[in-house]
Image: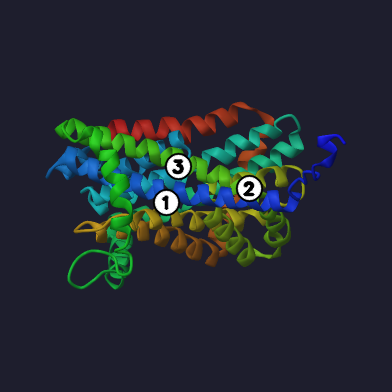
Amino acid sequence: MDIEQSLPPVQALPAQQVSRWRRTLRWTQLLMLLYLLLVAVSAVSSGFKIAAGNHAAELFEFASHPVAGLMIGLIATSLIQSSSTVTSIIVGLVAGGLPVGIAIPMVMGANIGTTLTNTLVSLGHAGDKTEFRRAFASATVHDFFNLLAVAIFLPLEMAFGLLQRLSSAFVPPFLDSGNMSMKGLNFMKPLISPGVDAMKAPFAELGMLGGVLLALTGVLVLIVSITLMGKLMRSLMVGRAKRILQSAIGRGPLHGVASGTVVTTLVQSSSTTTSLVVPLVGSGVLKVRDVYPFSVGANIGTCITALLAATAITGDTAAFALQIALVHLLFNTLATLTIFALPVLRELPLKGAKLLADMATHTKWAIAAYIGVVFLALPGAVLLFTV
């Protein structure tokens, strides 16, 4: 008898079991990337401290003007295309000595810079004027909301220190009375220390230059980890996200804001979340008015990354790291409550987006002018005259 015939048949793993193993592997990879994110933030903080010594504030004198800080945050986020990344970097810088007052306008600027992604995504509908008008309006309504939020809260911050005062009031409950480490989160230091020490090792003997290289390495790891986290989350829940978008967004502003918050908390990228809905509006599945609250909710959901990053900071600067993360959350939450509470303000982003979409439909130069002025020319001019 043939030996091959006597062997039992090899059974393939059921497709469901293979799918389960793949999802488990992806969730494991996601946890590893989250660990890298926390290590990177701590490395940025450590590198900044080494490089700056006791002169951290002096290194950022060029950003001492609030409007200059706003533009720095805007440009940085426009280039990196992730407000989560930029705000995480800001958390690390504040932990390293950057004053909270200087960092607050940078956080506001990051909110504006992140809107460039879905504006570029809308250009994919440029072949059809009707689709493009809808898609471009759905993308830029996010821009106009964030611009309006900054127009309201930056003057209040400059005049009264509103966000700085509010955020400082929320910090003490999270801190131990005897030191500045976070209550219940002290386990982070022993978990993160091995990774941070491994990143420090190659630069240990380089002094100030080593600090700069360590901070740059931390920024690079931050960017890579957040990018990969976004891709993994899209693969893990993209189908579910689409169903949530189609079933929940159109139920009203509250559902829209809540859905945007939840989905962006999972994806950890407001750019990803808001870009998902642009094609749906372009194809007519959703309306601009439907996705407007969803985009606003994405602003709130993206704050989770900076809050997670703040848990990586312990010691004397932990309070300030937590404070700037809370500033991000308070700014987006208060902006949502303020603008949506007043019908006159609530309609302004919709009107601005539709007007700009009409102009862009008639001439493509309007698109280039809008992107060039808001994301390049205006920030550059402001920095030139304020530095």
In front of the other: 260 or 22: 22
Q: Which of the two discs, 2 and 3, sits closer to the camera?
A: 2
In-image side of 197 versus 76 (left or right): left
In front of the other: 46 or 381: 46
User: Residue 206's image quarter?
Assistant: top left
Q: Are marks 1 and 2 in contact (CB under 8 Å)?
A: no
At label 3, counting other C-alpha atoms closer than 10 Å, the crowd grade (few under 14, some 14-19, many 20 or more) is many
Q: Position of residue 53 (x, y in %)?
A: 13, 42
* Quadrant where the image shows the N terminus: top right
What is the spatial separation of the Cα atoms under label 3 and label 1, in whole angstroms? 32 Å
In front of the other: 298 or 23: 23
User: Residue 63's image quarter?
Assistant: top left
Q: Which residue is mark 2?
A: 22
**In the image, what residue type sits under mark 2?**
Arg
Q: Which residue is mark 3?
A: 225
**In the image, what residue type sits under mark 3?**
Ser
Secondary structure category for the residue under label 3: helix
Instruction: Choose the circle earlier in sequence order: 3 or 1.
Output: 1
Q: Which of the two discs, 1 and 2, sits closer to the camera?
A: 2
User: Residue 230's image quarter?
Assistant: top right
Q: Which residue is mark 1?
A: 151
In the current view of this chain or complex, which residue is farthest to the left?
Answer: 54
Q: Position of residue 318 (x, y in %)?
A: 25, 59
Instruction: Choose the circle earlier in sequence order: 2 or 3.
Output: 2
In the current view of this chain or complex, which residue is farthest to the top?
Answer: 365
Residue shown at 40% from the left, 56% from the top:
308
Q: Position of residue 351 (x, y in %)?
A: 61, 49
